Amino acid sequence: MARLISRGFLGRRRPPEVEKRLPPGQYLVTDFPVLSAGPTPHTPLDRWSFRIDGLVKSPVSWSWPEFQKLPTETVTVDISCVTKWTKLDTKWRGVTVDTLLKGVEVDPAGQYVMAFSDGGYTTNVPLNELINGQGFVAYEFDDKPLPPEHGGPARLVVPHLYFWKSAKWIRGLRFMDRNDPGFWESLGYHIHGDPWKEERYSGD
Amino acid sequence: MNVETADMNTELMVDGNAIAGELEQIFGHDMTMAVARCAGCAADSMMATLMAFVRGPGAVLRCPSCTSVIARIVETPTATYLDARGMLYLRMTHAS
Amino acid sequence: MAALEWQLGTVTTIQPETPKTKSFYVALPKWAGHRPGQHIDLRLTAPDGYQTQRSYSIASPPELSGQLELTVDLIQDGEVSPYLHDVVMQGDQLELRGPVGGYFVWDVTVGGPLLLVGGGSGVVPLMAMLRHRAAQHSTIPARLLYSCRTPDDVIYRDELNQLAGSVAGLEVLITFTRQAPAGWTGYQRRIDAAMLNEVITPFGTSARTYVCGPTLLVESVANLLVGMGLPADRVHTERFGPTGS
């Protein structure tokens, strides 16, 4: 096979001033790349709902107006995509999973969560990595409604894991008693996905 | 597809032509004219005409009729994964 | 069947086509030839091992032997096209593999009449078909409907004029969607049903059509053509995103 370093091609950058904030193998971007596994769903807000089901005593569901009334938090976090870009200081507003779980009685066996989205996308996250402020359902980015190409009306954000875990167009959380793999986890990607441990692929 | 509601994600969608190289790498010959029958709606589509989302962790091919996932391809440093559960079959005409 | 292999080519000529489009001629010692409409995968490797890959349509006809012409739009904030436009010089090496794709392919053995519809740099694989047709002295009736934003965006303008004026049975119709040249009497709007209907009328539903461009243009033109009664298997489509893919 031919081998070549492309003359003058520097690829992406790891500027020294922010290098400490970039997980291994990641490169800084300042734009916000659009990556999706399918077409934008464009579900009208009057038909949108957010549901918590699976291993819970009784499933709960919020309409869009009900969801808007839930208390929100605003956070600024760094995000890392497994395709090797990291974006610093992204500002989100949304409802923490802690808030969503208030009043939901989770079966003690339900230690794993499958986030599910419009269009069929899924991703798995252990419950203990969604609570205590680690995961939230965001509907504002940079003080504006989250644009459809970035997952609007609402997406999961779990900034301490690779960004494929932050499911776009999220419609709910399903509690499970096993850590079943989601869309990418079932095809070669790591079941957990911690960028600082570079858990990109299964076997990493 | 509603052109009025097109967003960046819709604009970035391509088709199976865009991954002709990856498919040929897997199958050993051109696959763009192989016909996939969708497991979701049974529509037949040449691989070239499938909706393709290629910017994510892997390539996702979807049925242009019902948007179901027909196939997914992931390249890792050590392996290639192909999930073709979304097709009932793939028909490859014999070269004449 | 030989595996698809990466090979090294040498850039022999770089030719500006429009303010944001350049053509790169790449000499390939191991090139096995291609058919009009096929493309190549191009791979760049940084000193730290970082790699990125894109697919580009081949603009040159098979008759141009020993080298390929690749025509590339400069995409702001892109990763590959700014490198090709601003860094690559004559004599540089590029790593590529191909040709790939067999679906979006036309040559004179396929026959006609031939209707080509292109948007922006979607004209590139269509140009390979027209150049091939001319090189073969084919008289298959052919029409190119080419959608451009402004006069500055017309790729291969002089060559298209020259081909249209000198090659029998070829008509080139350009539509400008943002701004037309002064005194322009041709189309000045996005491609719509009425325009397609006018362009396809001499050919009727027997036309073999090839549509290449941004996803939304391809989607809308293909739907219109099928709506006019063209059999779906005569409507060949190739979509690319705004990255010029």
Image (spheres, rainbow, N blue to C red):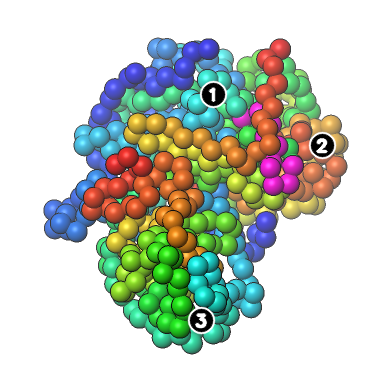
* Three-letter code for the amino acid on which mark 3 is drawn: Phe
Q: Report x, y in % for residue A58.
A: 55, 77
Task: Report the front residue among C171 and C215.
Answer: C215
Q: Is residue A148 left or right of residue A83?
A: right
Q: Which residues are magenta?
A: B32-42
Do the residues at discs 3 and 1 belong to one chain? no
Mark nearer the viewer, 2 or 3: 3
Q: Report x, y in % for residue C209.
A: 73, 35
Up-down relation of residue B43 to residue C128 (above or below): below
Tell me whether the residue at label 2 lies in contact with that at label 3, contact meaning CB atoms closer than 8 angstroms: no
* Three-letter code for the amino acid on which mark 1 is drawn: Phe
Q: Is residue C116 magenta?
A: no
Gap between marks 2 and 1 measured at Cα:
29 Å
Q: Residue furthest front?
A: A108
Tell me if residue B67 can be seen.
yes
The chain containing the residue under callout 1 comes to B
Residue indicated by mark 2: C231
The chain containing the residue under callout 3 comes to A
Gap between marks 3 and 1 measured at Cα:
48 Å
Q: Is residue A57 left or right of residue C132?
A: left
Residue indicated by mark 1: B27
Query: How many badges with numbers are in the image?
Result: 3
Task: Report the front residue among A102 and A20.
Answer: A102
Secondary structure of residue under mark 2: loop
Q: Is residue B79 left or right of residue A67?
A: left
* Three-letter code for the amino acid on which mark 2 is drawn: Pro
- Name the residue at 63% across, 17% down: C135
Q: Report x, y in % for residue C2.
A: 49, 13
- Name the residue at 84% across, 32% down: C206
Mark number displayed over residue A67: 3
Q: Report x, y in % for residue C63.
A: 56, 15
